[in-house]
Each structure stands twice: as structure tokens, then as C-alpha cells.
Image (tube, rainbow, N blue to C red):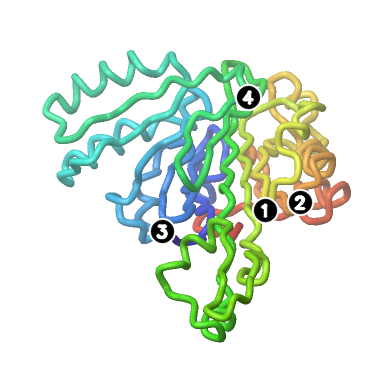
Amino acid sequence: MSSTFKVHILGCGSALPTLKHNASCQIVEIRGKFMMVDCAEGAQTMLRHTHIHFSKLQSVFITHLHGDHCFGLMGLISTFGLLGRTVPLHVYAPTALEPMLNEQIIMFCPHLSYEVVFHPVDTSLNTIIYEDKSMTVTSIPLEHRMPCCGFLFREKPLLPHIRRDMIDAFNIPLSQINNIKAGGGWITDDGTVLSHEQLVTPPDPVKAYAYCSDTRYLPHLHQLIEGVDVLYHESTYGKDKIDSAEKYCHSTAEQAAMVARDAHVGKLFLGHYSSRYEDETILLAEAKAVFPETYLSNERMIIDI
């Protein structure tokens, strides 16, 4: 099983697309799975730049129903049909999107070659909305001008690593590898007892990534994302526009850094920049004054979790 965990930034601007930034869209790549987070206009073009084949995309997670987070979804669905997709596409989004999406599919793609499976998300709940044997996705309630949630992607623990030197030294059959990984030991032909702990080394630590956009500053948010390795938090405004942040339920870069600091995250990536900032280094400086491990997101960036 691949241990790859990366985030591909496709768009990190806010509502007005510019020549510098596309609106919100990312690909989370984790243990061989590819999941899109938000799907603004331009998502397909930027997806081409990642060199991730369209067929690998398994699901789309939509935070809320503002256009700069979902206007690209119907185009993506249509393109998948043109490419002859046959496997289902899973869409996780606020409940209100389902009837609108169904109407659009009927209008524009009445003979779609694959199934679009809609999973309604209650944005007010902090709960697991997707789970498989290797990972979970949990909703993170946020506060915006409409129902909105973020998403927390977390690996499940892997099995420990087998010590090849011990396997070879004691001629342990390969057929016993899985039993040992699962917690078993081994008794040699001469009666020597080898414990599980002697035969393995600890598994790789699990990683976690939190995506929080859009939201006003929430003093309690850090409790829901405690200790994640990487946090992407909206930073639409600088301190000069804190009144606008409060009015439109957005956050400043400084407030994003406060969340990162209080959550003890590994790294903070800023995004969802207002188009009024031609140079986002002012946002970076304000955030780094609170949380030094802060970085600016940019299109085509790949974040290795």
C-alpha cells in the first residue's frame, strides 16, 4: 500500500478569479486515492497541470455552495462523460446541492455513462463522512454566510515493519509475515521464543491534513484539528480589512495563524486570498508573526504531508 500523502493546489484565490490565482480547488492524494476538495471554475484546466489522469479522481468534496467553490463541478461531470468514464463519482456536499445537481445532469448529461453518487453532508456536525481501511474524512463545522464545513483527512495506522534481519537469521517462513505484523511472535525449531516486539519495528506515524475554507475566525476551531501535520486555512484579508472579514464571515491571515498556533499544527498554508492583494507577502508576514511555520499557497504547488 502506498504511503503517499500529498496536496495539489489547483486554485487558492477567492471569489474573483484573476490572472494570478484560480478560485478554490485542490486534490488530496492519499495512499493511492485521489479526492478533489472544492471545484471552482478552471478546475479541469488546472487538473491537467497536475498530470493526474482524470480517471483517477474518485470523489469530490464541496465545502459550501458559493460559486467560487462549486461552479466547476458540472463541467467536470460532463467531461468525465465525454471521456467514457464508467466508475461512479462520489460527491460529498451540503444537502441543498443534490436537487440542483440532479437537474443539471438531466439537462446537460441525460445519457451519462457512469453514476454520480451524492452523499449529503450536514455541515453543522463534526463527524466521519467517509471511511475505508486506510483513511477517514471528517467534516469540520465552520461559520460562513451559508452552511459550510471544512474537511479533515486522516490516515489510519499501518501495520509495523518486519525486521528482515530477524526473518533471515531465524529462517522464519514468509507465510508467517502477516501473522507477525498482526501481533504474533515465533517459536524456532530449537524452542527459542521470539516476541512480536523483537521481530518488528514501529509503523510509520499517521498523518493528517485539515482544509478550512471559508470561515470567520473561530476561537474553538483548534480543538477540532489538534495536532494535524498541515492546515490550509483561509486568509482572505489582512489586518487592514478586519472589518470586511467580520462583515463577510472570513478570516485574516493573523487569525488563521492563531488557529494554527492553538492547534499545534506542523505547518500552516494560507489561501483564499482576496483579489485586492497583488502581493500576498503582507499576509504571510502578519501570519508568521504569530505562527512562524506559515507558507503561502500557490497554484501548481504540491504539499508533501
Q: Amino acid at mark 2?
A: Leu
**Few, some or many residues within 10 Å of mark 4 (<14, 14–19, 20+):** some
**Few, some or many residues within 10 Å of mark 2 (<14, 14–19, 20+):** many
How far apart are the two marked residues, 2 and 4, measured between alpha carbons? 29 Å
Circle 4/circle 1 CB separation < 8 Å = no
The structure residue drawn at horizontal position 44% and vertical position 60%, both measured from the top left corner, is: 1
Circle 1/circle 2 CB separation < 8 Å = yes
The secondary structure type at the circle numbered 1 is strand
Q: Which residue is mark 1?
A: 296
The structure residue drawn at horizontal position 75% and vertical position 30%, both measured from the top left corner, is: 221
Q: Which residue is mark 2?
A: 284
Could you tell me residue 147's position as x and y percent?
Answer: 57, 17
Q: Amino acid at mark 3?
A: Thr
Q: Amino acid at mark 1?
A: Leu
Please tell me which residue lies in front, 248 or 116. 116
How far apart are the two marked residues, 2 and 3, measured between alpha carbons? 25 Å
Please identify the quarter of the rendering in which residue 73 is found. Answer: top left
Circle 3/circle 1 CB separation < 8 Å = no
The structure residue drawn at horizontal position 37% and vertical position 35%, both measured from the top left corner, is: 72
Could you tell me residue 16's position as x and y percent?
Answer: 53, 35
How far apart are the two marked residues, 3 and 1, measured between alpha carbons? 19 Å
Quadrant in the picture for the C terminus: bottom right
Please identify the quarter of the rendering in which residue 144 is found. Answer: top right
The first of marks 2 and 3 along the sequence is: 3
How far apart are the two marked residues, 4 and 1, measured between alpha carbons? 27 Å
Q: Nearer the viewer, mark 4 or mark 3?
A: 4
Mark linked to residue 50: 3
